[in-house]
Image (cartoon, rainbow, N blue to C red):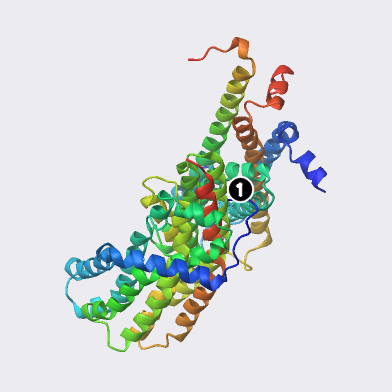
Amino acid sequence: MFKWIHKFGSPPFVYGFSKALSPWIGLASLGLFAWGLYLGLVKAPPDYEQGEVYRIMYVHVPAAWMSMFVYVVMAISSAVFIIWRMKLADAVAEASAFIGASFTFLALVTGSIWGRPTWGTWWEWDARLTSELVLLFLYLGYIALRSAIEHPQSGARAAAILAIVGVVNIPIIHFSVEWWNSLHQPASITRADGPTMHISMIIPLFVMLGAFQLYYAHHLLVKLRVVMLERDRRTKWVAERVQNGKL
Amino acid sequence: MAEWLSMGGRGAFVWSAYGITAFVLIVNWVWLKHQVRAAATKSKRLAKPNKTYDT
Amino acid sequence: MSTEQETPTVGIWQVFSTVFVRDLRIAFSSWSEGLNPLLFFVLVVSLFPLGIGPDPRLLSSIGPGVIWVSALLAMLMSLDGLFAADHRDGTLEQWVLSGQPLSIIALAKVCTHWVRSGLPLVLMSPLLGVFLNLPTTALPVLVVSLLLGTMILSLVGAIGSALTLTVKQGGVLLALLVLPLSVPVLIFGAAAVQAVVEQREALGQLALLGGGVMGALALAPVGIAAALRVGVSSGD
């Protein structure tokens, strides 16, 4: 088991793996984006309540989903790093932080743009948007803590602890915000999504979700190469790859 | 076509949401390519000590 | 000194009380400094009527939120540098090397921090409630909610304080780390008081805060200890 982890978790192997696989994943993501945009913007029928504006959902929902997915990835790899001292896991967390914050930012901005025609305001303290805002702060805290600690190894471990503390808190934060929202606003404002949607409106959503997932996978694989090169710049495997012209 | 672009009069909202998403995803991608290239160049320079000139 | 010397067997309670008493002594020897968060709390709350206007109905409707946000900020202010002095003079390193459970030591530090910074806020809060025209029935709930809430804030905030141990000028960073994690405490704490103001039951919110104290007591010391180990081992 550990031998297996040692082999497939070693930087040279991951570097080669990433180099071989990432272009294909990137292409697949591009293909899914094209298909999903065509389905979502052209094929899907307008919503009978919201008209055309509901199409913002096809970028808003995947971005919101990815913002949480990436944070969970960061927290799990942080736990692996803390428990087994596996450096690759820390590299995954480091490579995910910024793109995760970008997804969160997108979820907030598209949610706000969607809110203007449906709610009449740019910002509504709706439970989901508020949770996304708190999540953005969690991401920014992670990035800031990591860059504030000069010693890279301490920074990595401190950031990992923060990610784990954050992920324990996310369900509590989410629950409290939902509760707070239901307390202050009677459920008069709802968006037309959920089980009432027609199947032809749901399929584009899943295609776009796949496109976002693959975009993240591609980003992660390539960013891992950057992180590993920066860490292992003076090691043998990098020198060997340079000599073989395989960098 | 014009009718499609207007999105039932809500075109500004729909297209700005899609536009900002495209912008952020593309900028992240371009920045990533730049980082990969920069990291590779630097590693190549460091791996060949006889050809380095420290500035 | 031989290296094979065994760690003297000391009970957990003794470790806790030693650190707790030591820290309390330090706190009392510089008591005026310890009053800063309290002063901040009182100042901020009394500025709100000046900014918003003296309408008693408005004040009593925003009162719970104002008092709670101010208490949160006062706690945050007191957290900055919670472990800094012990880190600077090497005490922290001794604790890490002592072989005693670091989480117990951390818990003792958090308890002193709460006695010193949290408790004064709790005791002062009824007076501020009167300032903001809260009904008398809301004052006991205000006190209980702050009592439980500041405990959670001390525990969770100490994790942030330990994480920023080696960061110079870590005040804003500490706020960025701790404030998102304090959202549930703020929501349930302020809502408990609000409920009484609106003549509803507040028991549910207080029970949730109590549960939060239990959860934080169980988990936070482990996190604080882990963060302190990282800070000490970074070797500057």
**Residue C119 percent location from the top left of the image:** 35, 74
C186 on left or right of C54 = right
C218 on left or right of C43 = right
**Residue A221 percent location from the top left of the image:** 67, 38
Q: Nearer the viewer, residue C4 or A75?
A: C4
**Residue C88 percent location from the top left of the image:** 40, 49
From what the image shows, is residue C196 above or below residue A132? below
Question: How many badges with numbers are in the image?
Answer: 1
From what the image shows, is residue A168 above or below residue A244? below
Q: Chain of mark 1?
A: A
Mark 1 belongs to which amino acid? Val
Q: Nearer the viewer, residue A56 or A26?
A: A26
Task: Report which quarter residue A237 is drawn in.
Answer: top right
Label 1: few (<14), some (14–19) or many (≥20) C-alpha neighbours in 10 Å: few
Task: Report which quarter residue C79 is drawn in.
Answer: bottom left
Residue reaching furthest to the top: B50
Q: Write the residue at 62% across / 10% down.
A: B50
Q: Write the residue at 82% across / 44% down.
A: A4
Residue matched to label 1: A42
Q: Nearer the viewer, residue A217 or A162?
A: A162
Q: Write the residue at 20% across / 80% down.
A: C56
* Callout 1: SS: helix
C65 on left or right of A27 = left
Q: Nearer the viewer, residue C55 or A45?
A: C55
From what the image shows, is residue C47 above or below residue C63? above
Task: Report which quarter residue A241 is drawn in.
Answer: top right
Q: Is residue B27 visible?
A: yes
C54 on left or right of A228 = left
Q: Is residue C113 visible?
A: no
Residue reaching furthest to the front: C1
Q: Write the residue at 18% across / 77% down.
A: C55
